[in-house]
Amino acid sequence: MSILYNDKCTGALLAAAIGDALGWPFETRAGNKCKKPVANGQFQTWTRQSGGRFWSHTETIERGEYSDDTQLLLAVARSLQYGDKWNQYFVRQELPFWLSYERGGGNAIKTAARFWERHGCPWSETNDSKDVIAYFNAGANGVAMRILPHVIYGLADDDVDSLMSVVIRNGMYTHGHPRALLGATCYAYALYIAGRKTDSLEYGELVDAVLQGQRYWGKFHNVLPEWIEIGSKSLRSDYMFLWEDTARQICENLRRMQTALQSGLLDNSEEFLKSIGCFSPATNGAGDVSALTAIYLASKYAANPKQGIMVAAYLKNSDTDTNASMTGALLGMIQGVDWIPYEWQKVQDNEYILELSNKLLQHREDSIAYTNSQQNNIQVPIGSIFPIEQPKKCRGSNYTVTIQKYKTAWGQTLYIKNFDKNKNKQEVEQLSFDFKELQSIESGHTQKAINNDVLLILQELLYIDKKMSLPKLVKILSLILSTDLLDSEIAAQTKTKEKTVTKIRENCHK
């Protein structure tokens, strides 16, 4: 049966988000508070521990919500609507803004996004050498998981080299190691082959085609001047040797994959996946490992895509959200949309995902034209957004994390967090210590040492205005020490601490 391009691409985008949402609660680094989530093939609501050491908080992930995998995939898709300027939009707008709403992003891609936020590329030799070395050692799957839109955009073209070149360019913006880039090109080629196939895919045919296409996905496209030289210097090894060696290892694993699949019912999935590093904490998030995992599972379960996506989502000790997302995209490219259960079609932002698929296929460059009639729109680098729920606050001992749910003008859901330090007694005492180091403040008036009365008033001020900035606090402290507000006459006139605070606030605004 022939499946139309449109169905294949729509199925791929939708199944990528579905796999992400199914697998995310089972990902070992996701921070799921439930240590044994139920693998029942359904979306689930779960609680995630987030924020790291300094901003630790919990957040609720609703049914069908996806992680950074789909967020970045959609960011690339949106960028492609700018045509030849997609890369400028991606690194200057999408990546930096993604930091404000990312959910579960990896260290490598967040670090790269911060570099672009400061208008600098992560491989620049003007950066700290340690940062450049870390960039060229970044071999994770953050590239492979987001390149599907490039394949959809170029699926009707016969120029495979151009597709591989643009995939490498996309990857270089965040990752420098061959494992990340070759994992992405190998996976992109598999998507391209599956998407271009007009009749049924024979068992194991996809693996054979990818292996035969090594001359396409294994070719290095030096799209950035001096990049290889900087890479060789940072890695203290010839970059092209590492590239060719990584490509060779991928081919060896593809041949072993052929052998495993030829075993038919005797094929031991766990044994093969273990052999390529799918369950090892050191390698289970590598770009080449995720690409091989997706190609293997999509090949094995091509005739039963629902089962295939669940197997990927529930693989213990693996990068489940990325593996299931990438496997789902391949299965969608093979089987289209008809196999996707109705309940899975309710994945987060499903209508927007369907619309994006159509835009990519039609090469429509109209992303700037999105509008809506909301009164409380907020302009952000990627367009306008508006709040759709009351914010949720998570309070720690000395901080507050506010989570606000937004909707973009074109229909994507974003959760943006705001991190605030609570000003408390410890901070006031630290401030007083800093001033005591200086002994006093020179203000043109009588110098006065900081005493406990001053600290009590400052604490009251902070209780009233928890968002008071440090410069404003310093200004108030200077005012207190340079006036007679604490003299005995004033103290006698003000019967309560609140009145003293009011007088200080009034004087501060003069």
Image (cartoon, rainbow, N blue to C red):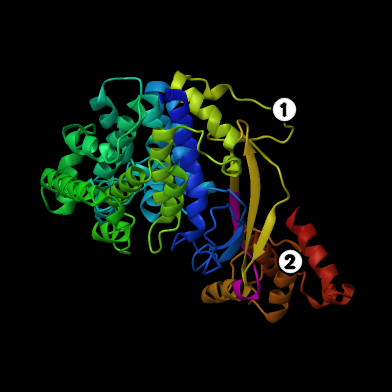
In this picture, residue 420 sits left or right of residue 279:
right
Residue 47 has which mark? none
- At x 58% / y 48%, what residue is drawn? 64
Front-most of 43 and 260?
A: 260
Figure label count: 2
Q: Position of residue 128 (x, y in %)?
A: 28, 53
Q: Secondary structure at mark 1?
A: loop
In the picture, the quarter occupied by the N terminus is top left
Residue 461 has which mark? 2
Q: Residue furthest bottom?
A: 452
Q: Position of residue 94 (x, y in %)?
A: 47, 37
| Alpha-carbon span between mark 1 and mark 2 | 40 Å
Q: Is residue 317 placed above or below 233 in the rendered structure?
A: below
Q: Is residue 316 placed above or below 409 in the rendered structure?
A: below
Instruction: From the image, tell me which residue sits under label 1.
Output: 373
In this picture, residue 251 sits left or right of residue 101:
left
Amino acid on which disc 1 is placed:
Ser
Q: Range of the magenta residues?
A: 416-427
